Amino acid sequence: NELYAVVGNPISHSKSPRIHSLFAEQTGEAVEYTAIQAPLEGFETTVTSFFERGGRGLNVTVPFKERAWQMASRRTDRAAAAGAANTLYLDSEGSLTADNTDGAGLVTDLTINHGIALADTRILILGAGGAVRGVLGPLLAARPASITIANRTLARAEALVDLFAGQAGETRLEACEFRAADAPMDLVINGTSASLQGDLPPLSPAVLGPDTVVYDMMYSLQTTTFNQWALDQGATRVFDGLGMLVEQAAESFQVWRGVRPQTAPVIDVLRNE
Ligand code: ATR
């Protein structure tokens, strides 16, 4: 079997080994996938020795995505724009290559799994950290009418608008504070880490219309704090990030193996565990 792993700290709760084992079983690919907890000061050494031992590919998670991007000697275009990497491998020349499959995972989950068309829609995205930066490129490529980035710290949202202005095309890309977002949206995406503290971005319910789709990039067994808020306001089309998690994994699997696994059965299995 060829060796793959996810590296993070902490890592014990990662679903990636389970997801990739299901992909390997389903596709018949000779993939063995484990979890590695790297010490905070030893991430780069962990990566280097993994590939020296013959490892074929890594996923990278919190808090190492930026360092994975930094240490790579090559970056795919989508990784370059994301400023962070969740996927590493050696290219045919043996150069450590960084990719980022998070944005593709989000867009596939929205459009394919949930059947949501993104072209010409009004999208509100909450947060302006690494998670949002990682998905803006693929969201813009879907040609929405507008993407509004709302963040607690306005300057960080403005910095993302500047960074992605060149990729916006016809899409209106703008930044605002939470309280300034007060018009009904087609899609509201929570990309803040507020849910981790059980916290809620102070968002006006006026952004939710009868058909607004609400998507929390977070995933947990219980309904996330943000999605519960949306349900309490009467939203009916509310999704969490489990599909995104499985889709980014499928995209990484395809990058490494050249084979695309079926995701629906894997999402079903995880939803019921
Ligand atoms: P990540 O990789 O998850 O994006 P990050 O880069 O630290 O992590 O960014 C966290 C995001 O969640 C930021 O947009 C942050 O807002 P600030 O830029 O103002 O810090 C947002 N965030 C974190 N905790 C929050 C809270 N309690 N309420 C609202 N926003 C929060």
Image: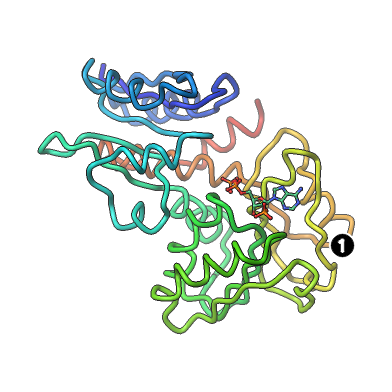
103 lies above or below 89: below
> Mark 1 vs ligand 1: CB under 8 Å?
no
Which residue is drawn at the image coordinates 60% and 65% (left, top)? 157
Q: Quadrant of the C terminus?
A: top right
- Give the percent coordinates (x, y) of residue 209: 79, 73
Q: Quadrant of the N terminus?
A: top left
Q: Residue furthest bottom?
A: 170
Residue 258 horizontal side relative to residue 87, left or right: left
The residue closer to the viewer here, 19 or 97, is 97
Q: Nearer the viewer, residue 69 or 263?
A: 69
Picture quadrant where residue 158 is located? bottom right
Identify the residue at image location x=47%, y=19%: 39
In percent of width and height, residue 176 lies at 68, 72
> Helix or strand or loop: what does disc 1 sit on?
loop
Q: Amino acid at mark 1?
A: Gly
Position of residue 257 measured from the top left corner of the image (x, y, whole percent)? 26, 35
Q: Residue, x 10% and y 38% (percent of image)?
A: 93
Q: How is the image coloured?
A: rainbow
Q: Residues within 10 Å of mark 1 (few under 14, many from 20)?
A: few
Give residue 7's position: percent from left, percent from top. 44, 26
In the displayed structure, does residue 160 sit left or right of residue 196? left
Q: Give the residue number, with chain letter if any, for mark 1.
A: 234
> Is 230 above or below relative to 30?
below
Nearer to us in this view, 149 or 267: 149
At 75% across and 73% down in the image, what residue appears?
A: 181
Report whether 163 appears left or right of 122: left
Give above or below for 62 relative to 142: above
Tell me how many marks there are.
1
